[in-house]
Image (cartoon, rainbow, N blue to C red):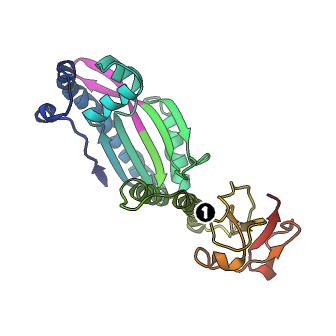
Amino acid sequence: MMIEKSGTIRLRDIPTAAGLSPKEQELAAGMVRVTHLYRSALKVAVTQMEILDEEFARLYDHSPIHHIEYRIKTLDSIIDKLRRGGLEVSIDNISAHIQDVAGLRVICYYLDDICYLRSLLTRSESYTVLREVDYIKEPKDTGYRSLHLIVNVPIVISEGTMVLPVEIQLRTIAMDMWASLEHELRYKSDRKFTQQDAARLRLCSDAISEIDREMQDIYQGNEPQYHARTQKTGPAGLFSSPAKAHNFHLYLPHRFVMPISGYSRCLSRHFLVRWSYNRACAPQNFPNKKFCGTQARERNM
């Protein structure tokens, strides 16, 4: 399924653009043609993704793509981005400095689906990956997770063949859910967004990341895995508790380590788990059956 986001630039929209100088009005007229070119690049990229999805479904009886969203940046957004970068508003600067005029978001079912699509794109002779930023391996401080690729997409027009950059974002359904709600809560909510809200969203992101891994293991028929990994500690007092002298890490199934402060009762709002408090450290043979697969350890602040 394809979902087109707003952002198409049409000739009738140009006079209504606020605050444009005569030079920018001329630029806007030129952007009508540029938009056509980027839209063509989007169509090529979307078609390629659909081909890969159908081929994978035929070979492995599984479609890696849940749905696709795409958009063209608005004229006002393009001009604003050039101005924020201290650049003159011109078609040349758009081509040289803005690589996300055309954007494609591919929502996948599982993490392995992202790896599969990425490997095909990076190995393809038809496309050149200009830039890759892996926010899945290294999430943003906000908790945002996604794989961003800037890919040169070739298109055939009346004047010949040309290539245009297209931003391709690869993420799972769970990552997309978090990103959509985070944007709604942070920027569109009537209430004031606080640091505690941001910290809670980061914890939600970690939990959703673990769910992604667990869902993939279930799909692949893997047994539950238990690992411990270091996680950035959230701000003190995130979970209201009278005890703030110590910091604890809660070891949950798979690779997730949940930072907590205080007593076990503080977890009831977030996790229905049983855990034990161990003043030493997590045992090497973790998990321990008598603790129902969860363990906590104390760390010095």
**Which picture quadrant has residue 287?**
bottom right
Q: Tell me which secondary structure the magenta stretch mostly adopts.
A: strand
Residue where numbered disc 1 is placed:
210
Q: Amino acid at mark 1?
A: Glu
Q: Percent from the top left, x then y, of residue 28?
A: 20, 26
Q: Which residues are magenta?
A: 152-167
* Residue 48 visible to the viewer: no
- Horizontal side of 151 relative to 299 (left or right) equals left
Residue plotted at (12% across, 31% down): 15
Residue 80 appears at what percent x and percent y?
33, 31
Q: Quadrant of the N terminus?
A: bottom left
Q: Residue at x 71, y 77 (%)?
A: 264
Q: State whether residue 103 is above or below residue 37.
A: below
State the SS at label 1: helix
Q: Residue at 20% x, 22% y: name it.
A: 21
Residue 90 seen in the current view: yes
